[in-house]
Image: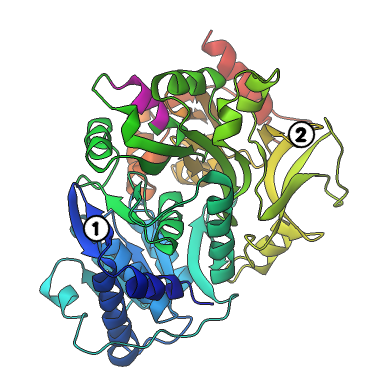
Amino acid sequence: MNLATWLARAARSFPEICAVGFGTTPYQDYRTLANRAARLAATLRQDLGLKPGDRVALAMKNTPDYMEILWGLWWANISAVPVNAKLHGNEFKYILENSGCRVVFTTPDLTETIEQFKPACVERVFEVRTAEHEALFGDVTLDLQDAHPDDMAWLFYTSGTTGRPKGAQISHRNIAAMTFGYLSDIEPIHPGEQCLHAAPLSHGSGMYMVPHLCKAGVNVIPESGGFDPAEIGELANHWGAVSMFAAPTMVTRLTGHPGDIDPSGIRTITYGGAPMYVDDAIRAIDRFGNRFAQLFGQGESPMTGTILSKAQIADRNHPDWRHRLGSIGIANSTVECTIADDDGTLLGPNEIGEVVIRGDAVFKGYWNNPEATAKALKHGWLYTGDVGEIDADGFITLKDRSKDMIISGGSNIYPREIEEVLLTDDRVQEVSVIGRPDADWGEVVVAYVVGEGVGPADLDKLCLDNIARFKRPKEYVFVDALPKSNYGKILKTELRETDKARQG
């Protein structure tokens, strides 16, 4: 089934309900959204010659145009490649080239970068809100195209330990399972209820557009296009009872915001992307009440792995409440999620192993990367790379990340990518990048460097010229040597202990 079937249904049954809000203004109703999606689909297929399965990139900050472009692609059974708007030009280039995108949609702030770095496969770049963009919505509409449940809907690029992003092929089936999991485990949605998108639409927040459209809800885009606590408060107070997805950093910023955010304007805040400190979660609950749910998932099983429900978070009287608040919850209703060893043997309570997931939400593999696919999908499970344990009640607690991933502000950062950039400076002999715990960001990036004649300013410039700003180390620590094993492997665990001691 094509996901766009839900848009066609909403347009028939709820044509005048607001589908997209922009700030405090109703922007598009469902009749208009479906019509424009069908018109865009016709141009893409008939005039630009795109075929089912072709890839089109959305290199865009949050904007109401995102909705009609994404759903127009799906209407035509074309695969969307939403790209993080914070990436460096070289990173845009790699993703566009690796995915073979023929067309790119941009917001004005990114057009120049895309034009500068676009690979040869990109035939057209359309900046939204221009005459050229508007001309794509002609008089002809395309009938809703059939799609097999396993056809790729969303090619999600997630960083890998090799330093190169991997494209997770997310199918219509995967996103439908995610939708059912949301409606089952997080909250029901009724026509006209709102979802506020302050987190990037290229990631989890964009996924949550789907269940709200499925049930004829309103997807609201802040005028700022991003996260601002004061604006969130104003929009929550205006629309009333909004739901939103937030990284833990966003939750802590909302909690600490001195302005007046009426809790009654918030229905649900689902946080994920990184663990939240228990004390931070309690402070958020104390301020906003029982309005929080937590999810655990990854791009390979979008927004679907485990769930710590609003009811479980609210149950302060449970004897294990603090322990559960520090866990990632229990398996989502649409998947199995447990702990296994490398051989696929499922482990019992309090045994430590890797978190594994299987079910209809799990992706079908990485784009043109069979080796990475084989490492992630084995013994019938998705191996997440996260190490944890499960208790007798089914609650899973993360212990470590086997791939040394750093999660800062809800964004995944892989050390090797940064290390490879820093090592391009001939004065850098060795480098090791680790995550340092941080109360505001979860973790911050720290680079330990062995080298002579090079300083922080040199390395900062090197990073800013090659990778996204948010991946840049917050501190460079210059040392005479890095801790190593007898085999010459850098001991990151020991390095993290050294860094912890340095912080007192």
Q: Secondary structure at mark 2?
A: strand
Q: Secondary structure at mark 1?
A: helix
The three-letter code of the residue at mark 1 reads Leu
Within the magenta stretch, is there residue 35? no
Seen from the viewer's position, the closer of residues 406 and 449 is 406
**Neighbourhood count class around disc 2 (C-alpha, 10 Å): few under 14, some 14–19, many 20 upward:** many
Using the image as rendered, state which of residue 261 and residue 74 is in the foreground: 261
Residue 158's place in the image compared with 463, above or below, is below
The secondary structure that dominates the magenta segment is helix
Determine whether, in the image, residue 285 is placed left or right of residue 260.
right
Q: Nearer the viewer, residue 330 or 239?
A: 239
Residue 151 shows up from this direction? yes
Give me the residue at 35% from left, 26% from top: 253
Task: Give the image location of residue 419, x and y in percent.
Answer: 52, 41
Q: Which mark is residue 389?
A: 2
- Cα–Cα span, label 1 and label 2: 42 Å
Where is residue 342 drawn, in percent x and y?
A: 83, 48
Q: Quadrant of residue 65?
A: bottom left
- What segment carries the magenta color? 251-257
Give the amino acid at mark 2. Answer: Glu
| Quadrant placement of the C terminus | top right
- Nearest the viewer among 330 and 8 is 8
Write down the residue under mark 1: 110
Residue beneath the point at 28% across and 31% down = 229
Q: Residue at x 73, y 63 (%)?
A: 374
Q: The N terminus is located in which quarter?
A: bottom right
Which residue in the rendered view is the most extreme toward the top? 504
